[in-house]
Image: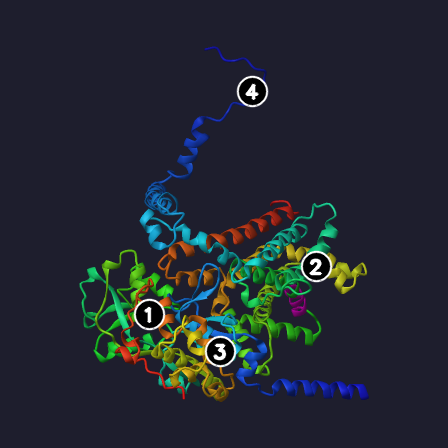
Amino acid sequence: MRTTKIIILGAILALVSTITQASTLEEVKARGVLNCVVTTGLAGFAAPDENGRWEGFDVEFCRAVAAAVLGDGEKVRFVPSTGKTRFTLLNSGEGDILFRNTTETMSRDTDLKLTFLPVNYYDGQGFLIRKDSGITSAMQLDGASVCIQTGTTTELNLADFFSSNKMNYEPVNSETNEESIANYTSNRCDAYTTDASALASTRAALKDPSAHIILPEIISKEPLAGAVRHGDDNWTDIAKWVVNALIIAEELGVTKANLHDHCAAPGDNPSINRLCGTEGNMGAFIGLDAQWAVRAIDNAGNYAEIYEATIGPNTPLALERGLNASWKSGGILYAAPIR
Amino acid sequence: MAPVPYKVGEHPDLPPPVSVTGPLAWLRNNLFSSPTNIVMTLVSVWLLYELIPPMLDWMFFDAAFSGENRDACRAQAGGACWAFIAERFRLFTYGFYPAEERWRVNLAFVLLLAALVPVLYDRLPARKIGLYYSMAFPLIAGWLLLGGWGLAPVDTDQFGGFMLTLVIGVTGIAFSLPIGILLALGRQSSLPIIRLFCVGFIEFIRGVPLITLLFVASTMLNYFLPKGTVFDLLLRVLIMVTLFASAYMAEVIRGGLQAIPKGQVEAAEAIGMKYWQSMRLVVLPQALKISIPGIVNTFIGLYKDTTLVIIIGLLDPLGIGRSSLADTKWTGLHNEVYLFVAIFFFISCFSMSRYSLYLEKKLKTEHDH
């Protein structure tokens, strides 16, 4: 009798202890690995290389967060997701953070209970079309069939654009970007629409890029940002300030190469000192140590270095900085200061 | 010409006239027997002529087998770029399995083949010992693939590619057959609780698409289970796939069971057999034989359904292919990837189907009517 009671009591205690909610930070630390929701594959942003190592712009942000939190940018488990499953994966706890070329919108922020991180890529939606169609403006697309991905903001923007211009179109849906491109190249649609960044890389990969043009109209704002789920403000702060730190490092000229010179001892520039953790301890505010930003930058460098290595002008994607240049050089990339 | 003499009743067998045998006659009978047939033949020949040479050109004669990236391929030749598949072959095979541990996957595969032999062929010396090995194989394979006890542990989220397909496919196939048999017997049971449970289970699982079950396994379970509970994603998928295939299997086997006349069970009971004896020795051997085509059909369906795991973030060969296409070096090579994956699935499914034919022939005991 007595042993049964003890067993039941023990079982209840065990259950209660598992129900007690650990914070995301504690969970990640206990697990020793960061679960990061990425795309199943988008050129330049996230894709596995031939050895199965994930590479890309979004991937480096995941690694930077892992470096700040766990001290090692390799301690990331990438959770590939389609446009439809990404938020479910994040909200169900399968992922701790999401970097999946995701547009920040009000409904996603509120209704889907996400908290968006600072924007890390400013994009806009455009059209790719075959040159021999003779179309030179998106306003001539009335009646065209358009290849799109389901579950994305591009799908909704497209509907808005056509209805506000009183035009008709025929959607050709697919689940992933790669399928959309396959549909477009096999002439199943007249035009292909997605974010301008992806259009450029898509066009470059086509068999005869000169036979295709990107129409001049950009029909939407697409601020791409990482996201975490509601309910853990400390975790939000960590993710948010890692992104900010990478942007600020570019502004301050702190790179992967000169990071350790700057951060070895307090220097003349207080901003750099605060970033390095040699003056004050900003890390304590977010539950990390003073070196958090140093580790984040040490992973793949500052924002500019990540950009250049994954999607910049010297990569096959050849995306100019444009809007994504730092505010100091004419762009709109502007991070709140660390102080 | 004088007739060749022969005795009455001993006329030698002459060969049939050329007009009814030989290739010409075959052509006439099968391809040119009627105007419709002639037209169909000509259209088919024209279609084949139009399709096959360009396909061969694309696949072999115009194809590039080496090259650093897509542009290097295209500079060499206008056809397929197999260098892409060659570079990615290991990713397609092992997924994200750590490179230095891949021998374990290879070993597990060889052991799988060895475990299949005693199951598939009964004319084997010492088959009984082999069968014990086959039964132990899931444990051995689990140990090899997951590690522990002296091997470096590997997380299941690093599984991918063909290896993932085989893990899910083989597990599903191996476990769905026995569970399916039990469910089918349970559905015909005279005990109401067992019968209700089996009917409820089968109808529920069959009434829900596999993709929904996978989605529940991958995300919804996390909402229900206490936070922080670690329940391996691949294990969840394996359970769901097995349950799904079991429900279909149960119905296939029930079809076989219903074809066995009731008199057989009664006869078995009359000579004193218990329920399980009569099932094992009399009913099931016949019922399963009848159900072979349906069973293999379910197996093949299950095997191909493994590609659905991409929606929950596991990368099977198709998923690996899609991700690989996003590599900036290789974007735009869809045809190569899809063809390659199709060939893999065709080989697997076609061998299953041929084995089932072999089994049907071997087990055929009735005389043709």
Between disc 4 and disc 3, the foreground one is: 3
Instruction: Identify the coloring.
Output: rainbow
For image coordinates 38% across by 78% down, the residue present is: A249
Element class at badge 3: helix
Q: Tell me whether the residue at label 3 lies in contact with that at label 1, contact meaning CB atoms closer than 8 angstroms.
A: no
Cα distance in 3D space between marks 3 and 2: 45 Å
Q: How many residues crowd mark 2 within 10 Å: few (<14), some (14–19), many (20+)?
A: few
Dot 4 surroundings within 10 Å: few (below 14), some, or many (20 or more)?
few
The answer to whether mark 1 and mark 4 are in CB contact below 8 A is no
Q: Disc 1 versus disc 4: distance between alpha carbons?
A: 79 Å
Dot 1: element: strand
Chain ID for label 2? Answer: B
- Any part of residue A59 in sight: no
Q: Which is nearer the eye, B341 or A66?
A: A66
In the rendered image, residue B297 lying in the magenta stretch gets the answer no
In this rendering, does residue B281 appear at all?
A: yes
Asked whether, in this view, residue A283 is left or right of residue B112, the answer is: left
Chain ID at mark 1: A
Q: Nearer the viewer, mark 1 or mark 4?
A: 1
Circle 1 residues within 10 Å: few <14, some 14–19, many ≥20: many
Determine which residue is flagged by label 1: A148
Which label is found at residue A175? none
Question: Which subunit holds the residue at mark 3?
Answer: A
Give the residue type that dot 2 points to.
Ala
Q: Mark 3 sits on what residue?
A: A68
Quick check: is B182 in the magenta stretch?
yes
- Residue that mark 2 sits on: B136
Region in magenta: B180-188
Residue drawn at (50%, 24%) of the image? B15
Residue labelled with disc 4: B11
